[in-house]
Each structure stands twice: as C-alpha cells, then as structure tokens.
Image (cartoon, helix red, strand yellow):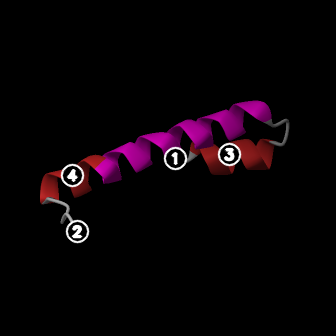
C-alpha cells in the first residue's frame, strides 16, 4: 500500500476546504432564509 506524503495530504486538505467553501456559498445564495444565509456566509 502506498503511503501518502505530507504534500499529498496537504493538497487533499486544501481541496476539501475549497469544496466546502463552494458548498457554503451555494447554500447561502440559494436560500431565502436570512438566518441560513448568515450562518453559511460566516466562512467568508
């Protein structure tokens, strides 16, 4: 089994963060609820 290098682990972590941010922005823009918009826009 191939071990992941530190660089690969960091790249994957950054990719996950970018995907999460895109998800949060999509949710914030797609809802009419001000509370949900506020919660999901905290990340910005």
Mark 1 touches mark 4? (CB < 8 Å): no
Relative to residue 37, is residue 44 drawn left or right?
left
Q: Earlier in the sequence, mark 2 or mark 4?
A: 2
State the residue at coordinates (55%, 47%): 42
Q: CA distance from mark 2 to mark 1?
A: 29 Å
| Residue 2 visible from this viewpoint | yes
**Labelled disc at residue 9:** none
**Which image quarter is the N terminus in?**
bottom left
**Which mark's residue is nearer the viewer, 3 or 4?**
4
Q: CA distance from mark 3 to mark 2?
A: 44 Å
Q: Which residue is mark 4?
A: 8
**Labelled disc at residue 20:** 1
* Residue 44 highlighted magenta (yes or no): no
Magenta residues (range): 12-30
**Which mark's residue is nearer the viewer, 1 or 4?**
4
Q: Earlier in the sequence, mark 1 or mark 4?
A: 4
Secondary element at image label 1: helix
3 w.r.t. 43: above or below: below
Q: Earlier in the sequence, mark 3 or mark 2?
A: 2
Relative to residue 24, is residue 6 drawn left or right?
left
State the residue at coordinates (66%, 34%): 26
* Residue 27 highlighted magenta (yes or no): yes
Q: CA distance from mark 3 to mark 1?
A: 16 Å
**Labelled disc at residue 38:** 3
Camera-side residue of 31 and 12? 12
State the residue at coordinates (71%, 42%): 37
**Which mark's residue is nearer the viewer, 2 or 1?**
2
Camera-side residue of 2 and 11? 2
Place residue 33 in its image quadrant. Answer: top right
Residue 30 placed where, x, y %? 77, 32
Q: Which residue is mark 2?
A: 1
43 w.r.t. 32: above or below: below
């Amino acid at each position: 089994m191939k071990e992941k290098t530190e660089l690969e682990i960091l790249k994957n972590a950054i990719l996950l963060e970018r995907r999460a941010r895109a998800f949060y922005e999509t949710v914030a823009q797609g809802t009419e609820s001000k509370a949900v918009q506020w919660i999901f826009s905290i990340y910005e």
